[in-house]
Image (tube, rainbow, N blue to C red):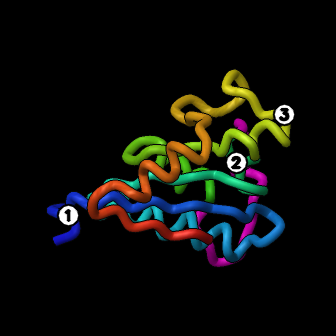
Amino acid sequence: MLAAMTRLLVVKATAGADAPERCSQAFTVASTAVSSGVDVSFWLTGESTWFALPGRAAEFDLPHAAPLPDLLDLLLTAGRVTACTQCAARRDITPDKVLPGIRIAGAAVFVEEIMSDGAQALVY
């Protein structure tokens, strides 16, 4: 049933290791949706922006949660992953430092996505 849906799900993760359960929820919901055939755009903002860098997701540990590297790989393979421009700049994260497949974009792109017909946005 979900595979037939053409709606866009935009998930914004605002937390990282500072709020591990909220961070894991964002990754889990987005990866579950993309596994179900939903078109997913996943945004790394705030402290989650660090996961745009190689190896950073592997440092995340939350008992009884799916491994973050696996979820991020799935999102990169079957969805879209974006790191917030300002959040990246505050952390000295540049396009040449991020994992392949992650773009850096700002509020205008986020607003365009969430305002598209049929889009649903979730912020964690």
Structural crowding at the residue carrying mark 3, measured as other residues with C-alpha within 10 Å and reported as few (<14), some (14–19) or many (≥20): few
Residue 34 figure quarter: bottom left
Residue annotated with mark 2: 51
Kindly state the secondary structure of the residue where label 1 is placed.
Answer: loop
Q: Judge whether 80 appears above or below 25 on screen.
A: above
Indicate the amino acid at tag 1: Met
Residue 17 appears in view: yes
Q: Quadrant of the N terminus?
A: bottom left
Residue found farthest to the top? 96
The question of residue 39 being in magenta is answered with no
Residue annotated with mark 3: 92
Q: Residue at x 33, y 58 (%)?
A: 8
Pinpoint residue 69: horizontal percent, then vertical percent: 61, 51
Q: Quadrant of the C terminus?
A: bottom right
- Read off the magenta span: 53-67
- Is residue 93 shown left or right of residue 115? right
Structural crowding at the residue carrying mark 1, measured as other residues with C-alpha within 10 Å and reported as few (<14), some (14–19) or many (≥20): few
Q: Judge whether 41 appears above or below 76 on screen.
A: below
Residue 70 appears in view: no
Pinpoint residue 82: horizontal percent, then vertical percent: 56, 43
Q: Residue at x 47, y 63 (%)?
A: 30
Kindly state the secondary structure of the residue where label 2 is placed.
Answer: helix
Q: Judge whether 117 appears above or below 52 on screen.
A: below
Which sits earlier in the primary sequence, circle 2 or circle 1?
1
Indicate the amino acid at tag 2: Phe
Q: Nearer the viewer, residue 15 or 107?
A: 107
Residue annotated with mark 1: 5
The question of residue 62 being in magenta is answered with yes
Q: Residue at x 58, y 73 (%)?
A: 25
Q: Residue at x 69, y 76 (%)?
A: 21
Distance, label 2 to label 1, CA atoms, is 28 Å
Structural crowding at the residue carrying mark 2, measured as other residues with C-alpha within 10 Å and reported as few (<14), some (14–19) or many (≥20): many
